[in-house]
């Protein structure tokens, strides 16, 4: 999975936040234009062409999908933020000499609440495989 630079991450955060919608649910799937991303990142004082280049590179990396809407391109994330983070975690495990040892170390480092979330997910996964 692709690691993101600071500006790429900021652009993806805009896309992920817009895709999640105001209530955390998925919007109609409408994409975001370069202008909308640039406006959302106005505190960075980025040139329109800089944002356009970043989005073009993200499309090339498979991080975003784009669709022509009139004369402009509309961009949307190719995967959710959570899917991207999960892929990064799996890639990090691939770097370990022992995936098992890395997983055990990770499991010992999570909070009690996080451990409960992991347990529930593993229980659900086991049930899905059996049923």
Image: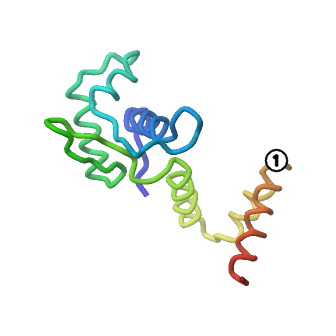
The relative height of residue 126 versus residue 52 in the rendered view (above or below) is below
- Please give the name of the residue rendered at 74% of the width and 69% of the height, measured from the top-left corner: 124
The relative height of residue 49 versus residue 54 in the rendered view (above or below) is above
Q: Quadrant of the N terminus?
A: bottom left
x%, y% of residue 58? 31, 46
* Among the 4 quarters of the image, the one containing residue 53: top left
Q: Quadrant of the C terminus?
A: bottom right
x%, y% of residue 92? 55, 59
Indicate left or right for 36 with 72 as reference. right
Residue at the spot of label 1: 111
- Please give the name of the residue rendered at 49% of the width and 50% of the height, measured from the top-left corner: 80
Indicate left or right for 25 with 51 as reference. right
Q: Residue furthest bottom?
A: 130
Instruction: Return the residue nearer the eye: 88 or 25.
Output: 25
What is the total number of numbered labels drawn onto the structure image? 1
x%, y% of residue 99? 64, 70
CA neighbours of label 1 inside 10 A, class few (<14), some (14 to 19), many (20+): few
For the residue labelled by badge 1, is the local secondary structure a helix, a strand or a loop?
loop
Instruction: Return the residue nearer the eye: 93 or 60.
Output: 60
The relative height of residue 11 versus residue 29 in the rendered view (above or below) is above
- Please give the name of the residue rendered at 59% of the width and 65% of the height, measured from the top-left corner: 96
- Please give the name of the residue rendered at 40% of the width and 15% of the height, measured from the top-left corner: 43
x%, y% of residue 123? 78, 70
Q: Residue furthest right?
A: 112
* Among the 4 quarters of the image, the one containing residue 12: top left
Indicate left or right for 59 with 110 as reference. left
């Amino acid at each position: 999975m692709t690691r993101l630079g600071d500006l790429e991450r900021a652009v993806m955060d805009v896309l992920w936040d817009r895709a999640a919608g105001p209530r955390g649910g998925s919007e109609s799937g409408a994409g975001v234009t370069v202008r909308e991303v640039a406006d959302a990142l106005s505190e960075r004082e980025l040139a329109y062409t800089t944002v356009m280049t970043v989005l073009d590179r993200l499309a090339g990396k498979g991080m975003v999908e784009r669709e022509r809407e009139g004369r402009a391109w509309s961009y949307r994330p190719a995967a959710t933020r959570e899917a991207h983070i999960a892929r990064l975690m799996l890639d990090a495990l691939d770097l370990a000499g022992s995936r098992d040892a890395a997983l055990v170390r990770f499991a010992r480092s999570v909070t009690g609440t996080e451990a409960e979330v992991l347990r529930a997910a593993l229980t659900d996964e086991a049930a899905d495989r059996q049923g």
